[in-house]
Image: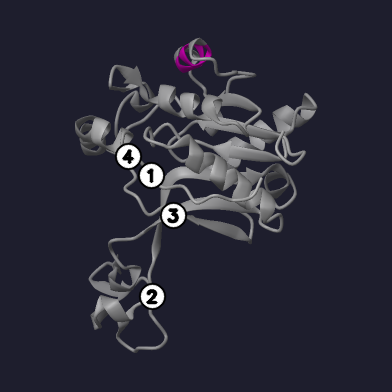
Amino acid sequence: MYKNKLIYGIITARGGSKSVPDKNLKKINKRPLIYFSIKTSLSSKLIDRTLISTDSIKIAKLAKKYGCEVPFLRPKKYAGDRSTDYEVFKNLSEQLKKQKELPHYFVHLRPTSPIRNVKIIDLAIKKIIHSNNYDSLRSLSVSKESPYKMWLKNKNFIKPIISFKKFKDSHSIPRQILPLSYWQNGYVDIIKSSTILKKKSISGNKIFPFIIKKETMDIDYLEDLKKVRKNFKRLKFNKRKVKRIPN
């Protein structure tokens, strides 16, 4: 335990995926996607247990092979295309609470982000524990596209998604004037179990912004998988500077 806080690494890997069939079992560098998140969690000096949440017996068996715990299978109703992270973690929290094994924090490591630096994961854990007033932590990257220049289409009309109050037509001003926006990159999310069970939320109201400046990869589509395979070695061995924080 770090600072007397019980911390679990959670890999969420359902069996079905329409965008990339059997996505969580696709191989990169001769290893299935789930392997990389499991390895990262097991390598952390601060994570006490590594669990997988899956509805797939095949994925469960493979996860156990790599040293991951499978305390129970995820119900199918929480493993569909429209299932939310909150539903998955609520079910997980309730099951662990029944077994009197509920942690203080969940470190969510999605298999779709196979390239991580475990030192960065440990830094994120330290950040949220040292800043105890936060409900959760979410890793972010600066967005290449500004939401102030994005539109919603309604039949034959369009309207801006959001407007910058300082300017009337914010969609048509130089991007340098607009505020920076950030994209959730899937590198790591950390959630207090109390946020899930008491606040009934996957993030709560106070979210710690954990900014990652280096390139990250998140696999949603087949093109992403091809890109990660092509750039795996370059990204894997790209040394990332890690800012220290007191123990």
SS for callout 4: loop
Q: Which residue is mark 1?
A: 240
Q: Which residue is mark 2?
A: 179
Nearer the camera: disc 3 or disc 4: 3
Q: Categorize mark 3 by other alpha carbons within 10 Å: few (<14), some (14-19), many (20+).
A: many
Vertical side of 77 occupied by 154: above or below: below
Under mark 3, the amino acid is: Leu
Q: Is residue 105 magenta?
A: no
Q: Categorize mark 4 by other alpha carbons within 10 Å: few (<14), some (14-19), many (20+).
A: some
| Magenta region, residue range | 59-64
Between discs 1 and 2, the one toward the N terminus: 2
Q: Position of residue 82 (x, y in %)?
A: 46, 41
Viewer-proximal residue among 92 and 131? 131
Q: Position of residue 176 (x, y in %)?
A: 28, 77
Q: Which residue is mark 3?
A: 140
Is there a contact, CB below 8 Å, between mark 1 and mark 2? no
Under mark 4, the amino acid is: Asp
Q: Magenta stretch mostly in which secondary structure?
A: helix
Q: Position of residue 100 (x, y in %)?
A: 80, 27
Q: Is residue 222 visible?
A: no
SS for callout 2: loop
Q: Which residue is mark 4?
A: 220
Is there a contact, CB below 8 Å, between mark 4 and mark 2? no
Q: Residue at x 78, y 24 (%)?
A: 99
